[in-house]
Image: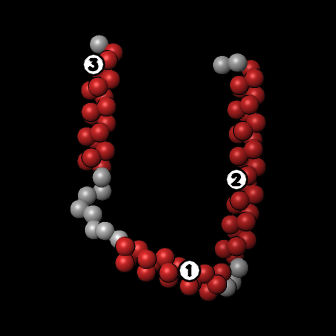
Amino acid sequence: MKNIERETIKKWINTWDIANTALQKVKSSELGVEDYYQKNLGLLNAMLCYAVKHGAVRLSSGLIEQQQFFMKFYRQNQNISS
């Protein structure tokens, strides 16, 4: 890896670290307000009502399908590298 690429990566890491700190402060201050939940109760209720009306019953979590996909991908790549 070139030094320029390393420096760019270090700058991005530093930028995201600063952003994370700032966002944590905002989150803490917003959640710390006494009437935060009362102010947002209507929005939360609307989201939950939407989820109930539009939600679909799932008979699986999708993990089986994900594992099948990974195995298919693995087999395809094994054939390419052999």
Mark pair 1, 2: CA separation: 25 Å
Mark pair 3, 1: CA separation: 52 Å
- Residue type at mark 2? Asn
Q: Residue at x 37, y 78 (%)?
A: 53
> How crowded is the residue under tag 1: few (<14 C-alpha within 10 Å), some, or many (20+)?
few
Which x, y percent locates residue 71?
27, 34
- Residue type at mark 3? Asn
Q: Residue at x 75, y 57 (%)?
A: 22
Callout 1 touching callout 2 (CB < 8 Å): no
- Residue type at mark 1? Leu
Q: Residue at x 27, y 63 (%)?
A: 58
Residue 66 is drawn in which quadrant? Answer: top left
Q: Which labelled disc corresponds to residue 43? A: 1
Which x, y percent locates residue 50?
43, 77
Q: Residue at x 71, y 46 (%)?
A: 16
Name the residue tied to disc 3: 79
Count of numbered circles in the view = 3
- Reading the chain from its start, which is encountered first: label 1 or label 2? 2
76 and 12: which is toward the camera: 76
Name the residue tied to disc 2: 20
Determine whether the residue tagged by mark 2 lies in a helix, strand or loop.
helix
For the residues carrying marks 1 and 2, which lies nearer the camera in this image? Answer: 1
Which x, y percent locates residue 1?
66, 19
Mark pair 2, 3: CA separation: 43 Å
In the rendered view, tell whether residue 12 sits above or below residue 79: below
- Reading the chain from its start, which is encountered first: label 3 or label 1? 1
> How crowded is the residue under tag 3: few (<14 C-alpha within 10 Å), some, or many (20+)?
few
For the residues carrying marks 2 and 3, which lies nearer the camera in this image? Answer: 3
Callout 2 touching callout 3 (CB < 8 Å): no
